[in-house]
Amino acid sequence: MGWKNVLKWSEVTPQALFLNRRQIIAGAGALVATPALARNEWSVEETPNSFEEITGYNNFYEFGYGKEDPAAYAGALTTDPWSVEIGGMVDKPGSYDLADVLKGQTIEERIYRFRCVEAWSMVVPWHGFELSGLLNRVGVQPGAKFVAFETLLRPEEMPGQQGGSFPWPYVEGLRLDEAMHPLTILATGLYDQPMPKQNGAPLRLVVPWKYGFKSIKSIVKITLTDKMPPTTWNILQSNEYGFYANVNPQVDHPRWSQATERPIGGGLFGGRKDTLMFNGYGDHVASLYAGQDLAVDY
Ligand code: MTE
């Protein structure tokens, strides 16, 4: 697997270097015990899926439609150097290289439930930092209401982007209050490894109370705007995929029920389990949608 080549850690800030030194140590093959990142208040208690499950069953259409295509083909993706263009209604627009994006941010472990709109689910031990930290640093201007995100466009390395009818690049968006919520992270890794390429190296969004398609991978552009931005699955099939895409067992997908989900790794007899409103994060996020009809704003 290609994760060892994801980042040159020498280019990362000293703080990030420190926080990620287990990767370096692991890469060097040394057997040195280092303290694990503390499981914090935002993490769930469930046991995470295995590294193999999380990195072997993916949706990343830039590398093909099959669940095993990303693991098979993402190795060719160049993720170093990497930069993110931050613009729109911000005080400090510009092209930020990855080390600069991470500067001053605290990388934490966040063990989150992850629920795909296709009705499968996992539990993933992400590493990442709160998106609000980056947005505060670049200075969100008054009047900004939404954040738009864009994935890398590089057909030479992303075979799924060659031809076809998909409107590349993959784009996503959040309302500003959703983007500023402490549960919303930019993830830089999982299981103490730099982000595997098939999971969206080197930087991807994770919004655990929303369907997985909101969690856009391999981000190269972040734009603050006063208009609701277009989002890929909504462009493709607006009656099936809305802008909000909050996990909601009461609002079915037109072609299947969202009441239950299939935990990956549950085995033949693992069965299905009930899907929770807001994927179980309702105590933290339900207030964001007070007064909204979530059957209309799906
Ligand atoms: N981001 C990009 N750029 N391209 C994609 O195809 N798929 C989305 C989301 N982010 C996707 C993407 C979907 S449908 C899901 S369920 C999650 O990524 C899957 O994330 P995972 O492979 O890390 O589980």
Image (cartoon, rainbow, N blue to C red):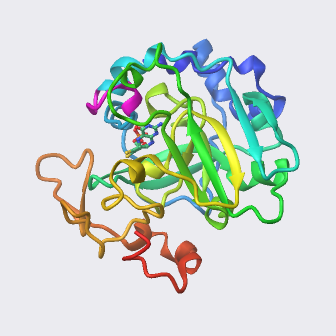
Residue 135: say if magenta.
Answer: no
Looking at the rendering, in which quadrant would you find the C terminus? bottom left
Q: Position of residue 39 (x, y in %)?
A: 59, 53
User: In which quarter of the view is residue 227 placed?
Assistant: bottom right
Q: Position of residue 32 (x, y in %)?
A: 64, 24
Residue visible at 44% across and 46% down in the picture: 232
Looking at the image, which is closer to me, 295 or 75? 295
Looking at the rendering, in which quadrant would you find the N terminus? top left
On the question of residue 47 being in view, the answer is: no
Residue visible at 69% across and 64% down in the picture: 145
- In this rendering, the answer to whether 222 lies above or below 98 is below
Instruction: Look at the magenta stretch and give its main secondary structure.
Output: loop
Looking at the image, which is closer to me, 31 or 173? 173
Residue segment shown in magenta: 61-68
| Figure label count | 0
- In this rendering, the answer to whether 153 lies above or below 81 is below
Which residue is the extreme one toward the bottom?
Answer: 291
Q: Left or right of 127: which side holds 294? A: left
User: In which of the image's four quarters is ligand 1 placed?
Assistant: top left
Q: Left or right of 85: which side holds 114? A: left
Which residue is the extreme one toward the left?
Answer: 269
